[in-house]
Image (cartoon, grey):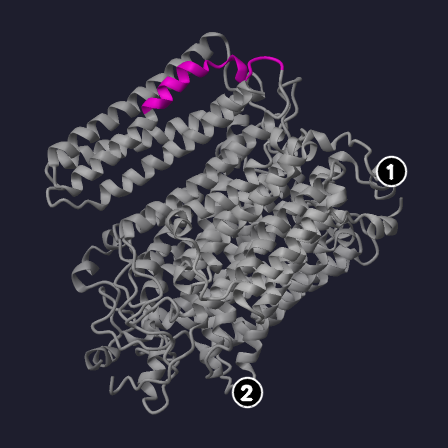
Amino acid sequence: MNTSQLLLTGWTWHPVILLIAVAASAFYLAAFGMSARFGYFVSALGVVLLALVSPIAALADGYLFSAHMLQHILLLLIAPALLLLGLPPSFSTPKLLQKIASPVVCWISGVGAMWLWHAPSLCNSAVSSRGVYAFQTLSLLALGSMFWLQLLAPRHEQRLNPLAAVIYLFTACVACSVLGIIFTFSPVTVCSIYQHPVERLGLLSLVRDRWGISAVQDQQIGGLLMWVPMCLVYAGAILGQLARFFGEPATPPLNPGRA
Amino acid sequence: MSEAAAAVIKPVSLLSDEQREHWRLAWLSTVDHKRIGILYILTGLVFFVFGGVEALFIRLQLSVPNNKLLSPDTFNALFTMHGTTMIFLVVMPLLFGLANYFVPLMIGARDMAFPRLNAFSFWLVPFGGILLHFSVLAGGAPAVGWFAYAPLSETPYSSQLGVDYWAIALLVLGIGSVGTAINIVATVLCLRAPGMTLRRVPMFTWINFINSFIVILAIPVLNAGLVMLLIDRQFGAHFFLQGDEGNSGSAIMWQHIFWAFGHPEVYILALPAFGIVSEIIPVFSRKPIFGYEFVAGSTVAIGLLSFGVWAHHMFTVGLGHTADLFFSGASMLIAIPTGVKVLNWSVTMFGGRIRFTTAMLFCIAFLIQFLCGGLTGISHAIVPLDWQTKNSYYLVAHFHFVAVGAIFFAILAAIFYWFPKMSGRMLSERIGRWTFWLMTLGFNMTFVIQHFLGLAGMPRRVYTYPDLPGWGWMNMVSTIGAFFMAAASLLLLWNVAISLFRGAAAGDNPWNAWTLEWATSSPPPHENFHALPPIHSRRPLWDIANPDRPDPVVGSSEKPEVAKPERTTVSVLAFIASEAGFFGVLILAFLFYNATPHPGPSAKSLDLLKTGLFSICLFASSYTLWRSEQSLERKDNRGMIGWLALTILLGAVFLGGQGIEYWGLFKSGVNVSTNLFATTFFTLTGFHGIHVCGGLVALLIVLALALAGDFKSGSSHMLKAVGLYWHFVDVVWVLVLTVVYIIPHFR
């Protein structure tokens, strides 16, 4: 198989996933109706599908740790943010969630999800067992939503103060960078299942010979993805918060002589 | 205002008549931010003479091919001392001095948040400088370059004490820098005048505020590397040195640690310079800064990116294409926020009524030279180009364009702009112009040609070179340029000296500037302001001068964006962030060095059960301390003292447990240099133990104060602050316990 064949045929149209996607859209339209926000919701679904049915998923299925990392970024960082943006401002999150979703809990959810799922045994079993894989996907989406809730909650009054949000995001960025740095420079393999892939789809020669990605390089790319692009997502969000901080419209001039 | 106007006629002095009688003591014992600022600047200027003379010797040696003026060893020592001095003892003190003097004035505060910490941080600078230079007497200055690459900096290759003094001096200076940075953060957050919301602070203040976070987070990384280097050199460990099997460290690790600090350090030097020009260009263009929000936001962006791109200093190390690719991309991104800044400064000048004062001339030269330095910087982000030009004079030219052409020119602009405020007298503009043109000519003669020298293949750090075509005359031009710069520096010192006695009286606001430091006398009285003008915008003095067309009001005074926090809490949290950086590096180093098992002692030989029991004592002490705080809130003095005493006891038991563990290891012949596990184990747990000791001392002080009845009122920021620190030390132990004891046991 070569690269273009992979891009064309590497899609796994799993009926359950597609069914859930269609059902979710229908549910969204029934509940909130058609609006510009539906675009965000559709892109959130698109990102989830990209992570789960595209060639990325095929490669993440035992071949490339880096593809698996890309999946993580899409499911934990991108999709939940778009999902929250897609909700109308009138939407109120469940009472129970409001109660437990303190900034500390949300921070630990987002960052903890990244750390926990990369404990070697969990990382391996998410590849070898379909059940664990499904659970991982759902937990990433849920915990990612928890993380972004502090910044993108539909109700603005539930969002963090912009400067507190900067600290929230910066510390998350540091925590993910540390894990990325460990993967990038670790002399040992983190997710050993990717070292000797089980040849399920016949992609091994493409990955190793044509693309020339060795197992060591693969882990490095994974670590670097987590370190650099992931941090850029956080950095972008920080700039967004600063825009919020500075964005309050200027009031008309006030005469200090008369004030 | 009228009293201040009356004071203009006779420039007031920083010292009162009474203090003048014992002026030595008045300066030595001062805790006033203005005098400390001046002391910082004077110290920076003194070391500038040292670093400058070193540079002249370097240029003299290189002026002609096959020169024998200096021996190779002397040359190595000179460029090492030149680099270290200019970065840590000239530019950082000068910038900290300016921040110290002007940040409190700009936000309408009376002083920094912690005046005594401020004095302590300052006095560490001369102390560190003396330590560094004492190495010359103690057997030889360091001769390993300012980044002291291992293994050259290790004992087998640099056996004299120079590198040890270098490392200890940098540790001392680093501690001072973190102290100042914490102080600036607390000052800006807690001491702003009424109406001076965080969205209205002058750009110089905002940038120093952001910069302080970079200092707080980057310096501890260097400190961790320095203590590792010292452990290697003093105790025969092998963090960065090859050794026997199981005891063979990594020289690349030093580079990672050094540049993880070193790249943010570049911005620690550059950002305050950006802050300076962001004040001066608007004033002399008679326009408010264009796109304040973008200049402010891009500062944050630069700060964020600075921590993620250090590996671009290591493209020639051989990190592999994968890493090179990512870091090349990330490094190029920095061009965006810096480009935003250059654009904003340029557009600020565009269409303005520009007054070409000396300060403004330096800013304009800054703008052009920084642009050049930035562009050659981008060329270093391109990996193959970097492979060719790294370690050549092209790189030397690049970083001098940023460090001198941008940063030092901005400092010169600041001296001309703010000298009237600090001294009450104007610097001579006539001599100033001569200084400017000599300096600009000299700078460009020295460094423009070095780009071509580098592209022609001349490597950096060679003490002499063969007579290759073109090299001789290009080096000669460069050397002559350096002497032009020296002449310009002498003119500046002359200007300062005569202006202090004969300069024209400055008055409160000689430049018709708009920020609060110009709303008081020159120099300002001890308490800074008699009365503050109302603050509704970013240019309060413009609003007063132009009541019919004031600036738009920014935000609202009544609803500030952030509540003013308590300053002790802010400072302890900032300190904890810094400590977290330090322990973060030590923990990562432990993980890295113990990724594969070594022959000899290992984590498996540790007694998990015993350590677990002692750890419980430490964790329990966090609980008892919390109970103590609760008691204090209920004004239950006896309960507070009881819980506090129990906390101290539990902490001491933990330390005792650590002592028993160490004793057992020593008895079985394991010490810090046995193998990499032992080295990293003792380093990590030892530094944690030292921090527990520090926490215990702090708790004992609190206990003594409590017994003396100081907290009867029921509120003590001190207990809360020490408590935060104690909890932090416990959290670090959770990580250490997991990484050192628990994970290896179950692997």
Considering the numbered disc 1 on the image, is that residue within a helix, a strand or a loop? helix
Residues indicated by labels 1 and 2 sit on the same polypeptide chain: no
| Magenta stretch holds residue A26 | no
Give amino acid for label 2. Answer: Gly
The outermost residue toward the top is: B668
**Real-space CA distance between mark 1 and mark 2, rounded to the nearest whole angstrom:** 63 Å
In this view of the protein, which residue sits in the foreground, A258 or B33?
Answer: A258
Horizontal side of B200 relative to B432 (left or right) equals left
Which quadrant, please, contains the N terminus of chain A?
top right
Q: What secondary structure predominates along the stretch shown in magenta?
A: helix
Horizontal side of A204 relative to B15 (left or right) equals right
The outermost residue toward the right is: A1
In this view of the protein, which residue sits in the foreground, A190 or B604?
Answer: A190
Residue visible at 70% across and 62% down?
B477
Res B659 quadrant in image? top left
| Label placed on residue A71 | none
Considering the numbered disc 2 on the image, is that residue within a helix, a strand or a loop? loop
Q: Position of residue B308 (x, y in %)?
A: 59, 49
Which residue corresponds to mark 2?
B351
Q: Which residues are magenta?
A: B599-617
Residue visible at 31% across and 84% down?
B544
In this view of the protein, which residue sits in the foreground, B677 or A179?
Answer: A179
Which residue corresponds to mark 1?
A205
